[in-house]
């Protein structure tokens, strides 16, 4: 993030200059995109829009940057995870148990800092984040350490959507819904493991919000984490059907 160590202080303005020069170079080149349109410039940024630290401005100079950006992809996922000592949704819609950040407040803050809604792209996660040592099936309760690595993705504290669905289908985990964050989670009483994630039900809230605010669209991390068996792709399909 510009202006926050180890990034030099001058990067707050350097990034604006860089994008300005990139836009000028693109326009002068005469090169077009495959559909004949001008080459576009975009950025993917974290959901947290912190703008000050130690009395100095940090982050992004959005009023200037947006002059040269066609859209901004907000990575509205990984908001919580096993680095927290309390279970929570990593894709909370309009509330969370840490009272820190949720998707609606993140997008609203970007807009208040100068990014038009129609240049904001909402990030969707086709995976879950999990905790171990959880004594009850609930968000907002103590948990410590990451959930075990998935059978295929092999990364602690992380499960692909297709891995989650497999665990539900074979009866290893039970499905639960959390109305505060408007997200699902799975829980194993035997292993005391909880994993919060995005499914087709929670995705509907995000898609409704995208359309109500006339956002630029949605992006997903990642295509290969959705349920690809039999070419289902339920999350990608839901996004495509609603936003095409």
Image (tube, rainbow, N blue to C red):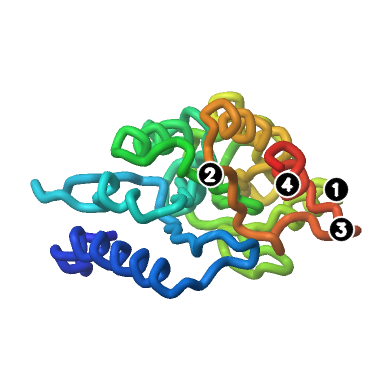
For label 4, the residue is 235
**Answer yes or no: do the residues labelled 1 and 3 have beta carbons within 8 Å?**
no
- Quarter that holds the N terminus: bottom left
* Front residue of 86 and 153: 153
Residue for point 29% across, 47% down? 62
Residue for point 68% across, 40% down? 243
Q: Is residue 104 above or below residue 30?
A: above
Quick check: 94 left or right of 173? left
Quick check: 112 left or right of 39? left
Q: Which mark is residue 169?
A: 1
Helix, strand or loop at disc 2?
Answer: strand
**Answer yes or no: do the residues labelled 2 and 4 have beta carbons within 8 Å?**
no
Q: Is residue 108 above or below residue 51?
A: above
For label 3, the residue is 231
Helix, strand or loop at disc 1?
Answer: helix
Of the numbered discs 1 and 4, the one sitting upstream in the chain is: 1
For label 2, the residue is 122
State which mark lies toward you, 1 or 3.
3
Of the numbered discs 2 and 1, the one sitting upstream in the chain is: 2
Crowd class of label 1 (few under 14; some 14 to 19; many from 20; radius 10 Å): few
Quick check: 40 left or right of 36? left
* Front residue of 44 and 160: 44
């Amino acid at each position: 993030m510009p202006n926050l160590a180890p990034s030099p202080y001058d990067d707050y303005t350097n990034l604006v200059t860089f994008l300005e020069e990139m836009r000028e170079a693109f326009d002068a080149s005469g090169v077009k995109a495959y559909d004949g349109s001008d080459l576009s410039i975009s950025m993917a940024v974290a959901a947290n829009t912190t703008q000050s630290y130690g009395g100095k401005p940090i982050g992004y100079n959005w009023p200037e940057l947006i002059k040269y950006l066609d859209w901004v992809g907000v990575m509205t996922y990984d908001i919580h995870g096993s680095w927290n000592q309390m279970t929570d949704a990593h894709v909370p819609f309009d509330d969370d148990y840490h009272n820190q950040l949720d998707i609606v407040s993140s997008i609203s803050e970007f807009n208040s800092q100068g990014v038009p809604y129609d240049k904001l792209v909402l990030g969707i996660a086709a995976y879950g984040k999990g905790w171990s040592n959880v004594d009850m099936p609930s968000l907002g309760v103590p948990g410590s350490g990451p959930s075990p690595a998935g059978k295929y993705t092999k990364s602690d504290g992380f499960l692909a959507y297709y891995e989650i669905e497999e665990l539900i289908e074979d009866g290893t985990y039970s499905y639960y819904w959390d109305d505060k964050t408007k997200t699902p989670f799975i829980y194993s009483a035997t292993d005391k493991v909880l994993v919060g994630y995005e499914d087709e039900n929670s995705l509907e809230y995000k898609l409704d919000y995208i359309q109500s605010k006339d956002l630029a669209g949605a992006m997903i991390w990642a295509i290969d984490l959705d349920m690809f068996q039999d070419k289902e792709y339920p999350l990608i399909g839901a996004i495509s059907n609603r936003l095409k």
